[in-house]
Image (cartoon, grey):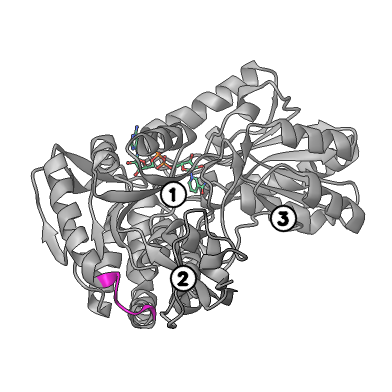
Amino acid sequence: MPENLFHFIAGDFYEGTPVRVGQVVNPATEMVIRHVPYASTVDVDYATTKAQTAFLEWATTPPAARAKILLKWQHLIEQHMDQLANLIGQEHGKSKDEAIGSITRGLDVLTYAIGIPTALMGQYSQDVGRQVDSYSIRQPLGVVTAITPFNFPVMIPLWICSIAIACGNTVLLKPSERNPSCTLLLAELALKAGLPPGVLNVIHGAHETVNALLEHPTIQAVSFVGQTATAEHIQKTAIAFGKRVQAFGGAKNHALVMPDADLESTVDAILGAAYGSTGERCMAISVVVAVGDSIADQLIERLTPKIKALKIGCYTEGNIEMGPLITKEHRQKVLSYIEDGIIQGAHLIVDGRISSFPEKGYFLGGCLFDHVTPTMHIYQEEIFGPLLAVMRVATYEDGLRLINDHRYANGGAIFTRDGDTARNFCTHVQVGMVGVNVPIPVPVGYYSFGGWKRSNFADHGMHGMEGVRFFTKLKTVTTRWPSGIRQGVEFSLPTVSSRNISHD
Ligand code: NAD
């Protein structure tokens, strides 16, 4: 990638007239590696016009023809997997394994999108009245925008854009300004695969650009992923400007560990789910709720040496388990939560501040707190870092109540060998995505992703059939062909038994 990035609009790089220019920093070296223009309202207007022009043709392109292009795009992304993983490493700090895993989960949704002809099949009913037939069809919305977070710079853009495009929409993708390069490569590959210019556009920027997108009259829908405060702002503003909106927010995911859980596999599952991607995952396990002191003590005893042994470093080293946090400010925020936890009386069992990690870069070791209580900030708030809180409850019911009282409700998991308890948990836990002995229950592409409560400000989930519903409008057509029989004039609402429909 060049040092100075451009927007990618209608198949070309476009400099525009930025409101300002941002820096892209490698979080493992603290070096400024690129500059990125933040689009002005004029640039947003230009991109929207191009996307609207492309929409007229793309909307009527047969779904099977769209699918063929998406299939080629998928192959090209697979061929450029290493390049994409390196860009993720450079701009986000993820290990190569983690980066490749996240691209693969993005491709999983693209695979679903390739099946769009089936997903778009409508319904048909013959003789809803005498000689009257009805059918329903799903039509694209128009120009839509995807506003994505820093923590999955390929996966989340693919989750949103592949479904939006497959449904016949054209997209303005606004990636995180922290790591914008991957989306440029994705858009270039899409063009190479045969996607017409203007169907997938990348427009860079921060809040000013997002607000210009939200206010633009041509844009029909907004799909957003990011922090809860931003999600709320996006939802309110998009609705005020008459747009369809889905806004996915932050999280605090619990793992409820029962006394009968398989200890060794539970410890491994929690370790990966809490510290993988340095805790910067909306589905990370950040709270363990242990049922009984005995299981809590055993978990802590086994987790402690493993957390201390986590391999921390730059993605170029290979074989690392945790990279840096995304920015200096974010690291500072996580550090302040550690202080806060200590002040509020939680027991710091593993102090990540004294782990071994490179001096330069926004690194932090894994932290483990025990005896965390419901009113503490480290429990109430999303930290988005390598910090795991252990809470102790006496019974399963206490644990379930604790989880259900939390305002975030993205995912949650139970670890147990007991089917009755697991079934009860799946039925009664108030979160959107549930795991049974599965720590990160992110649904596969043909199911849908989405939390509840303050983790999600959306009526439709991401990807799967929910994604198709979000990115299409339903139309129902009722038809009758002249048959030589006079209908007469009908002033009341037609019904099945009325003259107009039944020819009585
Ligand atoms: P963020 O909210 O800071 O940014 C997300 C996007 O919104 C970016 O493109 C950014 O440029 C834009 N943005 C930021 N502030 C804005 C403002 N005031 N007005 C308009 N636009 C603004 O989120 P982030 O820090 O990049 O990502 C991490 C967050 O995303 C975490 O809270 C995490 O839980 C959440 N997340 C949620 C999901 C989910 O599906 N629920 C998935 C991944 C990440």
Say which label, 3 or 2, has the lower sequence index. 3
Q: Can the viewer see residue 418?
A: no
- Magenta-highlighted stretch: main secondary structure? loop
Check disc 2 and give the amino acid type: Gln
Using residue 284 as the reference point, say whether residue 198 is left or right of it: left
Using residue 451 as the reference point, say whether residue 462 is left or right of it: left
Q: How many discs appear?
A: 3
Q: Which portion, as a residue range, is magenta?
A: 58-63
> What is the quadrant of the C terminus in the image?
bottom right
Q: Which residue is mark 3?
A: 435
Q: Which residue is mark 1?
A: 151
Say which label, 2 or 1, has the lower sequence index. 1
Q: Is mark 1 within 8 Å of ligand 1?
A: yes
State which mark lies toward you, 3 or 2.
Answer: 2
**Element type at mark 3:** strand
Mark sitting on residue 487: 2
State which mark lies toward you, 3 or 1.
Answer: 3
